[in-house]
Image (spheres, rainbow, N blue to C red):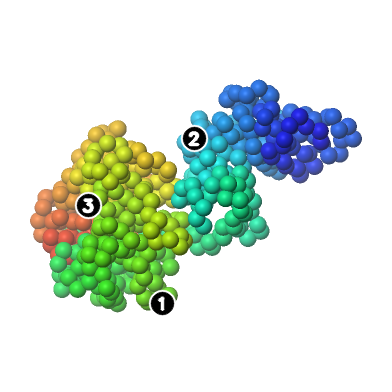
Amino acid sequence: MNVGSLCFGLFVDINDNLYCSMRNHHQVVKRSLHDSVMTSNRVAAGTGIQGSASNELSYPHGIFVDVNLDLYVADCQNNRVQLFQSGESNGITVAGSKSLNPTVTLRCPTGIILDAEKYLFIVDQYNSRIVGSGLNGFRCLVGCDGTGSQSSQLNNPSSFSFDSYGNMFVNDQWNNRIQKFLLMKESSALSFNQPKFCPTAIWNPDGITFADQSIVGQDPRAIFVNTNNTIYVANQENNTIVIWDEQSVNPTKIISGNFTKPYSLFVTSNGDIYINDGENNGRVQKRSAETSTFVTVMNVKSSCVGLFVDVNDTLYCSMSHYNQVVKRSLYDSMMTLNRVAAGTGIYGYGSNELAGPRGIFVDVNLDLYVADCYNHRVQLFQSGESNGITVAGSESLNPTIELYYPSGIILDAEKYLFILDQHNNRIVGSSSNGFRCLVGCYGIGSQSNQLNNPFSFSFDHSGNIFVTDSNNDRIQKFQYLEESCEN
C-alpha cells in the first residue's frame, strides 16, 4: 500500500482488505490485498478535510473492522468513536462526544477493540485509561487511578490488545513500557445485593428486631449483607464484628480485632472485611478471609464514616470531619497514595464541595454517590469529575424529596436511589414514580414501625431491608412484600 502519511492504525479484515488510518489527512483508506494495482486505495471513512460532521474525521487513530465489514474509528480530536457501517460514508457516534445515547466522556481516543459480543473497549489516551462497555454501559477498566507511573496507572497510552485469556496488554507510551493487566475471573461478582423492584414495591411497615443491644451493643452503626445473605454488624461497645450466616437466628461467629469506633464496614466477594479504625488509629483495616488476620490497607486522617470497594478494587473512605472522600487502589504498593475522589476538604455547598459526607456508593461505571449529610443532599460525582450533580435533596435539578441529614445510600439493579434520611428517621426510595417513604414513616420512636437516628442499611438478596437503628440499640429487619409487585 502506498500512502500519503503515517498510518496511525492498521487493520486487515476478513476479506483481506488492508485499512490505513491517516491521522494527518483526517481519513481512513483501504485496498484489497488481492488487487494487483498498488495505487488503488479507496476511501473507507472521512473526506480528507478536518471536521466534526458525520462524514468527517479529525486526526483518526486506531481502527477496527468487524465480520460485517463495519468500520470503527477512534476519532481522536473529536473525542468520539465513529461507526461507519459497510458502504456508508456517514458515521454514527457510538461513544464519546455527542453520541446518540449517553455513553462515556472521552479525551482523544486512540485505540478500539470489539469483543465477541460486540462490546466496545477504548484507549482513552488523554485520560490515561482504558474503558469498556457491557450490559451496564461503559466503565473504566484499567488506568482508573489517574495519570502516573504506578502499577495501577498509565501515562498517555496509545494502543492495546487482548490475549486469548482476556488479559490486556497496553502500550504505556510516556512510561516507556508495555503493561499487562490480568483478567480477574471473578471481577463481575458484586459482594452486595442490588435487588430489582417494581414501582409499587412495599415493605412491611412493622420491623422485626433482628438483634438487640445484648448482641450488637449500644449505638450500632455499621451493617453489611452480602449476596450469600451473610450479615455483618460492628459492635462498638466491645470492638467486634458479629456475623450471622443465612437463616441463622443467633450469631454464628464473632470476630475480635484491634480497632475502635467501627462506624463503617464493607465485605468483598472473597470474604475480606474492611473496617474503619480511623478515629484513634488513623487507618482502615482488612481482615483477610484466607489468613484470618488484620492488616492496615489505608492510612486516613479521621474516621471513615463510609467505606466502599469498587469493581476495580479501589477502596473509598468518606471522611466526614474533613469534608472529603478519598480513595486508593488496593493493588498499589504505596500506602500513602490516597487520592481525592470528591470534595475539596473545605466545608461548603458548591458543586465540588461537601459538608460532613457519610455513606458512599460506587456503581459499576465508577460513578460515586455521596450522602452529603450537612448539605441535606445526595451528590453524584461521575467518573473523573470533581463537580457533583445533586440527584436528591436540597437544590436538586429536578424536584425530588427533602432530606434531613442523609447518612446512607444504595442503588438498586435499575440505578434507583435508596437513601437513609437520618434525622427524619426513615428510609426513602425512588422509582419511575419518584421518591417516597418506605420504612420509618411514622415519626421518631421505638415502636416496630419507627426508627430513632438510624445510621446505615443494607438489602438481602430477597429485598428485605436491615437497618442499624442506632438510638434504639437494635438492628431492624423490614420484610419486602413480594406480592406488592405481582400485578
Ranked by sequence position, the earlier of labels 2 and 3 is: 2
Residue at which label 3 appears:
321
Q: Which residue is mark 2?
A: 101
Position of residue 406 measured from the top left corner of the image (x, y, whole percent): 22, 48
Q: Earlier in the sequence, mark 1 or mark 2?
A: 2
Q: Secondary structure at mark 3?
A: helix
For label 3, the crowd category at 10 Å Cα-Cα, with few meaning under 14, some 14 to 19 and many 20 or more, is some
In the picture of the structure, the residue carrying the numbered disc 1 is 291
Circle 2: residue type: Asn
Mark 1: amino acid: Thr
Report whether 467 appears left or right of 297: left
| Label 2 CA crowd tier, 10 Å (few <14, some 14–19, many 20+) | few
Asked if residue 199 lies left or right of residue 73, the reply is left
Q: Is residue 210 above or below residue 144?
A: below
Marks 3 and 1 sit apart, C-alpha to C-alpha, by 33 Å
Left or right relative to 243: residue 470: left
Q: Residue at x 22, y 64 (%)?
A: 280
Residue at left 59%, top 34%? 76
Q: CA distance from mark 2 to mark 3?
A: 39 Å
Residue 374 can be seen, yes or no: yes
First in sequence: mark 3 vs mark 1: 1
